[in-house]
Image (cartoon, rainbow, N blue to C red):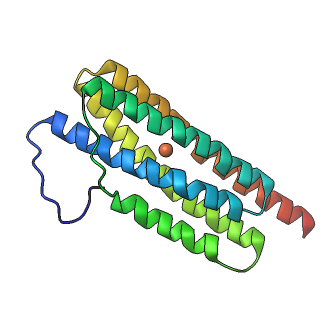
Amino acid sequence: MMGLFTSKRFDTLDDLFVAQLDDLYDAEQQLTKALPKMARAADATPLKDAFEHHLEETKSQVNRLEQIFDLLGHEPKRETCEAMKGLINEGEELVQAKGDPAVKDAGLIAAAQRVEHYEIAGYGTARALASRLGLDRAATLLQHTLDEEAAADRHLTQVAESYANDQAALA
Ligand SMILES: [Fe+2]
């Protein structure tokens, strides 16, 4: 969510919409820096691939937000999304951690899925606001990203499950 200790005014849904977009924009940019580290830290190839694939998607998502800012004639405010910063810090703990690579991978997946769920919440709200404001093009772009985030989350669940099955087969 928004940076701490800032006071702003929300008089209209447009104000709220734009603030939500600014927040998502910073969150996505933080994520483009974190995902390469997570990909390097991942041990299993499917997990590395998942992070690398989602990095490319995340770059497109940044681009989609920029398209919406253009449509609105809004200059995005770079204000730290504290929630994403916290989620990434928790992921960073796993990136730095020592120990069993499979257990670390499971931890990286857990951290990444928290990120996806956070983004799904943010984009769900932003898409709903865009629809209410009659901003159809923005709503379509946001829905596209929302679908990608949901797919990324499902994919991580599949990677986690296939991993768990491999481990069981070895036992
Ligand atoms: Fe994203």
Q: Is residue 92 left or right of residue 132?
A: right
Looking at the figure, which quarter contains the C terminus?
A: bottom right
**In the rendering, at what x and y percent does residue 23 appear?**
32, 48
**In the rendering, at what x and y percent does residue 2 appear?**
26, 56
**In the rendering, at what x and y percent does residue 14 appear?**
18, 33
Give the residue at x 38% y 44%: 25
Q: Nearer the viewer, residue 166 or 111?
A: 111
Q: How many marks?
A: 0
Reply above or below: 112 against 58: below
Looking at the figure, which quarter contains the N terminus?
A: bottom left
Give the residue at x 70% y 80%: 98
Q: Quadrant of residue 6?
A: bottom left
Reply above or below: 71 against 65: above
Q: In this view, does 6 lie to the left or right of 99?
A: left
Q: Is residue 120 left or right of residue 32?
A: left
Q: Quadrant of residue 168?
A: bottom right
**Residue 146 seen by the camera:** no
Reply above or below: 90 against 165: below
Give the residue at x 29% y 54%: 79
Reply above or below: 171 against 69: below
Q: Which of 71 and 9 is in front in this view?
A: 71
**Residue 7 seen by the camera:** yes
Residue that extends furthest to the right in the rendered view of this protein: 170
Residue that extends furthest to the front in the rendered view of this protein: 75
Q: Which of 37 and 110 is in front in this view?
A: 37
**In the rendering, at what x and y percent does residue 131 appear?**
29, 25
